[in-house]
Image (spheres, grey):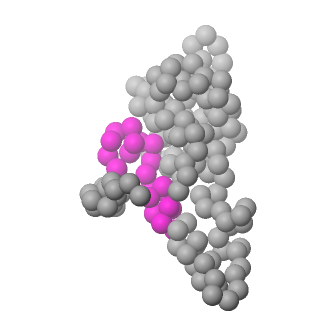
Amino acid sequence: MYISAKADYALRALVTLAATPGGGPVKAEALAAGQNMPASFLENILVELRRAGLVASVRGNEGGYRLARPAREITAADVMRATDGPLAEVRGLRPEATTYAGAAVHLQELWVALRASLRSVLEHVTLADLAAGTLPRSVRKLLSESEAWAPR
C-alpha cells in the first residue's frame, strides 16, 4: 500500500492537534515546524481537512487549527479518505465495481478483501489512540507478528 505524503502529513498534524493540551488552536506554521513538514503544503492540506469537517480554523492572533470533533471520533481512515479519496481503488474504480473475465475473474474478490483488510485497521485506530500510543488490541496483535516488521 502506498501512503501519500499528503496523508502522512495530515495524520501527523491531526495527531499533534489531538495531543494539544486543552484542544486549543495551533497555527499551521507551528504544526509544520513541530513535525518537520513544509508549511505551505501543510496549509493546503489543512484547508482540505477543514472542508472535510475534520478541523476547524480559528481566526485572530491566537487562532490556528483545532479538531472539529473529539479525537476519539476521528479515525485514520477518515483522514486518509479526506486527503486521498477511497482507501482502495483499482484503475480509478472501487473494488466492487471491477469486472474480470476468464482466469482473472477472482481478482475482484482479492481487491474487496484487501479493502476490508485496510478498513480493519484504519477504521479502528483513532487520533486519540495515536496521540496516547494505545493502539487497539487487534492492531497491536498485527504488530507482534515478526513478519509485520520484515521488509519486502
Give left or right: position of 8 versus 47: left
Q: Residue furthest front?
A: 152
Residue 121: % across, % down: 44, 58
Residue 88: quadrant of the picture: bottom right
Q: Is residue 130 magenta?
A: yes
**In this view, 18 is above or below 140:** above
Between residue 60 and residue 107, name the one nearer to us: 107
Residue 72: quadrant of the picture: top left
Can residue 68 be seen? no
Give left or right: position of 90 versus 121: right
At 71% across and 73% down in the image, what residue appears?
97
At 48% across and 30% down in the image, what residue appears?
17
Give left or right: position of 111 versus 121: right
Residue 60: % across, % down: 64, 13
Give left or right: position of 4 versus 124: right
Give the main secondary structure of the magenta stretch.
helix
**In this view, 39 is above or below 94:** above
Residue 150: quadrant of the picture: bottom left
Total numbered labels: 0
| Quarter the C terminus occupies | bottom left
**In this view, 103 is above or below 17:** below
Q: The magenta stretch spans which residues?
A: 116-137
Q: Is residue 42 magenta?
A: no
Residue 140: % across, % down: 31, 55
At 38% across and 54% down in the image, what residue appears?
151
Residue 100: % across, % down: 69, 81
